[in-house]
Image: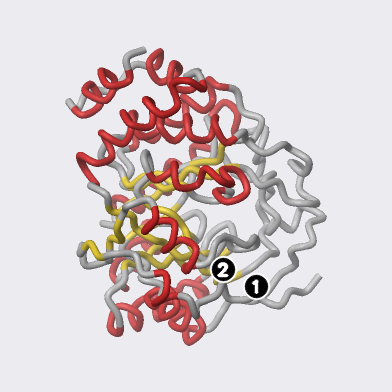
Amino acid sequence: MNWQSLAELSLSGSVISREAARAVLHASADDTLSLLDAAFRVRRAYWGRRVSLHVLDNAKMGACPEDCGFCSQSSKHASPSGEAPMKSVDDLVDGARRAHAARAKRYCMVTATRGPSQRDLDTICAAAERIKSEMDIELCASLGILTEAKAQRLAKSGVDRFNHNLETSERHYEKIVSTHTWRDRVETVRVAKAAGMDTCCGGIVGLGESEEDLLDLAFALRDLDVDSVPVNFLDARPGTPLAGYPLVEPAYALRALCMFRFVHPRTDLRVAGGREITLRALQAMALYPANSIFTQGYLTTGGATPHADHQMIKDAGFELELASGEAVPADPEAVAHLRRPSLPQVRS
């Protein structure tokens, strides 16, 4: 496979073939640098050398009635993550301030639930209004299944983007979740889009899926025309049905990111959960296909500090993209005092 020709095809606006996408996943170790260079050519055309930081806040932890096999927040699993009640508006605003201090472009409020209750929605919307009045940061919410009315209210309050991942292919989904369907997720993405919010929708590599499942996911997301694709790598949690599943090999993780970039040339592509533990010393290489990362951890698991991520971005010769669209240098020393906030105190 000529990777530069594949980059040209992706840049032309044509959808690459399934066979070409499969070839990316099968690239040899000797092809790693040339593959990354071709993916970076596509990434650079739309995103330059900019990297945006995103911060997650676990607004409501645990006791979720859904049975997603990868999630330690499900009440169906014997996971030790515990639970904590919905945070207050003040707590969420403070979280946004920490994200802003870390020079994050986006702050995402997440609840472990099937869908937002009226009380939870009140809190999220009130927090969104205050955050938007106080600081220049984009807002994302991940609250489960939405109705049209709830989606419209979120958009009106200032939530810019809604996250609802497909996780895997439609074929593989029923092996991972039984309490809702893949089609339920697709419908929520459409509802969020119709309400005027950007859509953030990706998946997890390492769920025991086949190569065909991963390709199905990539092309399904393209068909949905989502605005952002977070690619997570399974960090299997104790007590969940997937406990003991192996980590994805770092070289395969990079090839998967390149495949997603060729399929989604213009999309905000994020290397998401599992980045640090999966890619290890190769983390900076993920910035060549991906243009955004999470910092300060992943809800119930730790992650790199803002200082470490600023340093990585600076060392690799990239720059930060702020909510304003301005590109600025990464500054490790300016965020050296910031640490990942402690996880909520849990009830077992």
Rendering coords of residue 65 (x, y %): 68, 57
For label 1, count other residues whose C-alpha is less than 10 Å away and answer few (under 14), some (14-19) or many (20+): some
Q: Do the CB atoms of the residues marked 2 and 1 lie less than 8 Å apart?
A: yes
Residue 83 horizontal side relative to residue 209, left or right? right
**Which numbered mark, 2 or 1, is in the foreground of this view?**
1
- Quick one: 240 or 174, which is closer to the camera? 240
Q: Which amino acid, by three-letter code, is at mark 1?
A: Leu
Residue 165 position (above or below residue 125): above
Rendering coords of residue 222 (x, y %): 34, 33
Residue 252 horizontal side relative to residue 11, left or right? right
Judged from this view, the residue extending furthest toward the front is 315
For label 2, count other residues whose C-alpha is less than 10 Å away and answer few (under 14), some (14-19) or many (20+): many
Q: SS class of the residue under badge 2? A: strand
Rendering coords of residue 334 (x, y %): 39, 77
Q: Earlier in the sequence, mark 2 or mark 1?
A: 2
Judged from this view, the residue extending furthest toward the bottom is 90
Residue 133 position (above or below residue 234): below
Residue in the picture at 67% in, 39% down? 247
Residue at which label 2 appears: 58
Residue at which label 1 appears: 343
Q: Quadrant of the C terminus?
A: bottom right
